[in-house]
Amino acid sequence: MNDWPEGFSGDNRGSRYGRGSSSARPESARVMRQVRRGPAASPGQAPYGGGVPQQPSYVDGGGHGPGDGYDSGYNTGQVYGSSGGRGPGGPGGPGVGVYEPRPAPNWRRRIKVTAITVVTLLVVTSVGTYFWADSKLNRDVDLSMVIDRPEAGEGTNYLIVGSDSRKGMTAEEKKKLHTGSAEGKRTDSMMILHTGGGAPTLISLPRDSNVTIPSFKGSDSGKFYAATGRQTKLNAAYSEDGPELLVRTVEANTGLRIDHYVEIGFAGFASIVDAVGGVEMDIPQDIKDTKSGADLKKGKQTLDGEQALAFVRTRYALQGSDLDRTKNQQKFLSALANQVATPGTVLNPFKLYPTMGAGLDSLVVDKDMGLFDLASMFWAMKGVSGGDGKSMNMPIAGNAPNGNLQWNTAKVKTLVSQLKNDEPVTVSGN
């Protein structure tokens, strides 16, 4: 006997079997949804790729799956920004495992930028140095004041003057350099440097040379002074009316036009020598001169500024007196120019700028003198010391009645002609 109500018996539970139905037809077995989870994390990788946890995907056993509208793509990970559940921190995302490759450096562009930068710096430095150096030149000599000038010839003629000016020197410096304290200034040495298409020629003009003072116009007053035929030492012209009268006297007594004037005083000379680190010289003999302060032994040695000044001023310790002194001056100035023009000085700013500063501050030049003219002069003097040029004294015939040195008129005429035509000099001096 069945105590269960109809519809609840174990043999016939109706069409709603399992659901309280009275139906006599059993219900088919139901299929439960499957839960899909993302791939397991690889060793060393954070679960779920280290990003947002991947949500389980519910797939209906009756055929519902991705793409049939049931899941709408939410559980595929697309909502986090990339397919396959790879968000910003997921597998393959930046910062984990895989990186964007760094682009190869553009060496051509880098070299181009570097080259442009270097060239720009060189140009700026060169231009700045030029204007700095140009501003230091003392252009105090006005050659337009010189009257009745000879015609210009081929090449360029520099009148280089070493004066005994003590301007700006302290009492201690005067004592150290043995210059004394005489007022004013006089020429201690005078040279003509000729440059042109051929080898340079350096000619010393002894300060005791006998010359005739020509007519001239005063450099300060502008007053005209007529010639009187007065003969005197060459250095007297400088003492009377400065560089302009000296140039006028040299031109009138030689017939050679002077294109540029360069003068340097005692202190400036010593400063230049010290700035380049001294100048090596081969001293021809032992020299002991209490007046110039020279105390040198024969042979090769490096002279500092004080020793160099004493050497070029030495006169009484030499047998040949003024003529031998001018030869020593030529040798030293050529050696100095050679030292200044070396790569060790030109390419070393720690030597170049002190040398330029010391030299340019102490130089007195004519108003038309430029830095390129000055560089050309030093280069030519370097050529003389290197054996490419010629150095000599003005040819001397003997002594004049007043005891001064008389030039050899015939030789001087030939010498001047060769210089004007920029021809090799064949004349020999004393």
Image (cartoon, rainbow, N blue to C red):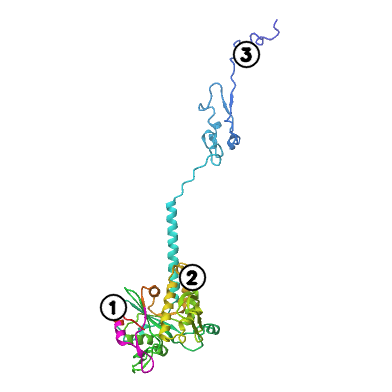
**Residue 418 lies in quadrant:** bottom left
Classed neighbour count for the residue bearing mark 3: other residues with Cα under 10 Å, few (<14), some (14–19), many (≥20): some
Q: Which residues fall within the magenta stretch?
A: 391-414
- What type is the residue that disc 3 sits on? Tyr
The kind of secondary structure element at disc 2 is helix
Residue at the image position 52 percent from the left and 27 percent from the top = 66
Q: Which residue is mark 2?
A: 351
Query: Would residue 272 be seen by someone viewing this image from the given angle?
Result: no
Q: Which corner quadrant holds the N terminus?
A: top right
Residue that label 3 marks: 17
Whether residue 85 appears in magenta in the rendering, the answer is no
Q: Earlier in the sequence, mark 2 or mark 3?
A: 3
Q: Secondary structure at mark 3?
A: loop
Q: Position of residue 103 (x, y in %)?
A: 47, 46
Q: Amino acid at mark 2?
A: Lys
**Does residue 412 belong to the magenta stretch?**
yes
Rendered view: 359 above or below 178: above
Question: What residue sits 45% from the left and 81% below the top?
Answer: 312
From the top left corner, tell me how far across and down residue 7 is, in percent: 65, 10
Q: CA distance from mark 2 to mark 3?
A: 113 Å
The residue tagged 1 is 421
Q: Nearer the viewer, residue 329 or 56?
A: 329
Q: State if disc 2 and disc 1 touch (CB < 8 Å).
A: no
Mark 1 residue element:
loop
The residue lying toward the viewer, choosing from 376 and 391, is 391
Residue at the image position 43 percent from the left and 58 percent from the top: 115
Q: Earlier in the sequence, mark 1 or mark 3?
A: 3
Mark 1 and mark 2: span between their CA atoms? 38 Å
Residue type, numbered disc 1: Asn
